[in-house]
Amino acid sequence: ALTTDQVGALTAAQIGALSATQAGAITTDQAAVLTTDQVAAISAKAISGLANDAVAALSTDQVGALTAAQIGAMKATQIAAMTTDQIGALSTAQIGALTAAQVGALSTDQIGALSTDQIAAISTKAVAGLTATQVEAMTADQIGAFTEAQTAALSSTQIDAMAAEDLAAFSTGDIAAISTKAIPGLSADDISGLTQDQVTAFTQTQIQAMNNSQVEALLAAYLEF
């Protein structure tokens, strides 16, 4: 096996020529000595071969050197192996490269490490990967960071997982962006906890998709203002 000094002496071209199997042989000690240039040189095909503990051994600077293509090619288990510090160090471009499966593999601690800018950078396709448990673990600030496009991609189950105080963080644009398929996820209590601006932001199409208890809560909210 190569020593850490030998690994550190490999050129970017040599690193780029590694196969997934060869990348899988990189130990935690060897991973720790890779330069940012060497990390960035690992091919997208080879990056998926890195052992989970080798991924976890990377510094935040090394993780920051990963390209969007590399991030997108990583296995969900590799993303799940990252520390909260590593997750917090990911750029918005790297976050935007995550797949739905990778996002769904994040632990609640990792979700908690995401900044509002990172939350807003998750692609609409990847947002679909958020589990109810993950959504429940998100703070109101994180929920409020969802873009209208992301909100439009949320499912009824994901909306249902949000607490009333989380939904209160939605902008009026977010409220209007909730799809008719996701409307059933709103409880009467959720609607009752909304502000006047939020209540009046519901579209006619959304209201038509509501059940009786939701409509009653909406009318009651109107009367309170």
Image (cartoon, grey):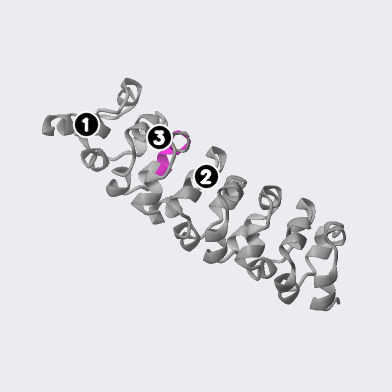
**Label 1: how many residues lie within 10 Å, few (<14), some (14-19) or many (20+)?**
many
Which residue position holds label 3?
182
Magenta span includes 155: yes
Horizontal side of 113 relative to 36 (left or right) equals left
Q: Position of residue 71 (x, y in %)?
A: 66, 52
**Label 2: how many residues lie within 10 Å, few (<14), some (14-19) or many (20+)?**
many
Residue 121 bears which disc, if any? 2
Magenta region's main secondary structure? helix
Horizontal side of 211 relative to 124 (left or right) equals left
Magenta span includes 152: yes
Q: Secondary structure at mark 3?
A: loop
Q: Which residues are magenta?
A: 151-158
Q: Position of residue 88 (x, y in %)?
A: 52, 60
Horizontal side of 170 relative to 8 (left or right) equals left
Q: Secondary structure at mark 1?
A: helix
Q: Amino acid at mark 1?
A: Leu
Sooner in the amino-acid sequence: mark 3 or mark 1: 3
Q: Position of residue 7 (x, y in %)?
A: 82, 72
* The quarter of the displayed image where residue 15 is located: bottom right
* The quarter of the displayed image where residue 87 is located: bottom right
